[in-house]
Image (cartoon, helix red, strand yellow):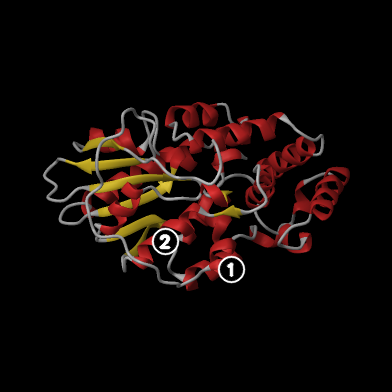
Amino acid sequence: MKYWTLGVMAICISIVSCAQKQKTKTVPAQPAAEPASNNNTLLWKISGNGLEKPSYLFGTIHLLCADDAVLSENMKKAIGGADEVYFEVDMDNLLDMFGAFTKMKMRGDTTLHDLLAEEEYTRVKNYFEEKGSMIPFSMLEKYKPILAASMLESGSLPCDKTAVMEQVIMQQAKENDKKIKGLETMAFQAGILDSIPYKVQAKQLLEYVDEAGKGKTGEDKELSEMWKAYNEQDLKKLEDLMIKGDIGINNYTDLLLYRRNSNWVTKLKTLLPGKSLVVAVGAGHLPGEKGVINLLRKAGYTLTPVDNKRETGREI
């Protein structure tokens, strides 16, 4: 499934289970500093087009090794100087997050057993039960298969402890007493997944399970390449990896990425004036002709790469 999974829907369980309120020393509100030496960065300054204050665009990845889930000093400064922090959805709304559990299920009491042949279903069930999951398979098989697959992808990370990047950013925003908002709603994201035929999703899940069952697979390799590209902040590489993605899901690129990018930029045109925002969305939404960076430029804004060097706990 790679990056196509709608990240916030897929990680809301983690957010709800590990939400925390601890306070640490806040970072003084300062504008993000020097530009990056090249375009290998996840952090971009939005200025021009009549804006009185700069805002910042940041690319997240929804699950990564905990040692890599570190914010740069410039990202901390951008959050410290912002009026509000926007995610794909409002991740501070626990009521909405809990409500997402019901939205994860397929419509009409459909289960994975209804979508696959008997022996295919058995292969998937056995894999989940052998591998283990934070959610029992009896519940998981009622979820939209894309979301079930996203839980398997975490096992491809080269580490034992994982983290949710949005959670790290949200914690930093809370430490700076920043309002947290969303560009979309959970209901909207759930509706997008309902627009992709469940059988298509189920076949992709089956393919993932079959490949993963063989050991170190091409799928694992591509996922590793994606996480490596993210840690190297190489948006061009991320875009190339997405273009190589699963054919079945790639048929829905316009639905999953491009339309949403356009909708976000339309909304940002009304949000940016008079405020300084940090907008943190999946890194896959940033690059390319139809990516958020280019769409904002076409709308008249200046997008400048900002140095985003981080002190991570692992060598990249």
Q: Is residue 104 visible?
A: yes
**For this rendering, which residue is in front, 274 or 142?**
274
Name the secondary structure under disc 1. helix
The Cα atoms of the two marked residues, 1 and 2, are separated by 14 Å
Question: Seen in the image, is 280 located left or right of residue 215?
Answer: left
Image quadrant where residue 91 sits: bottom left
Q: Is residue 188 visible?
A: no
**For this rendering, which residue is in front, 308 or 48?**
308
Q: Which mark is residue 170?
A: 2
The residue lying at 47 percent from left, 34 percent from top is 232
How far across and how far down the image is residue 211, in percent? 76, 35
How far across and how far down the image is residue 162, in percent? 60, 53
Q: On the image, numbered disc 1 is attached to which residue?
A: 17
Q: Amino acid at mark 2?
A: Met
Question: Seen in the image, is 275 located left or right of residue 163?
Answer: left
The residue lying at 55 percent from left, 41 percent from top is 4
Image quadrant where residue 289 sits: top left
Question: Seen in the image, is 258 located left or right of residue 32?
Answer: right
Along the polypeptide, which appears first: circle 1 or circle 2? 1
Q: In which quadrant will I find the C terminus?
A: top right
The residue lying at 76 percent from left, 33 percent from top is 216
User: Are there few (<14), some (14-19), or many (20+) residues within 10 Å of tag 2?
Assistant: many
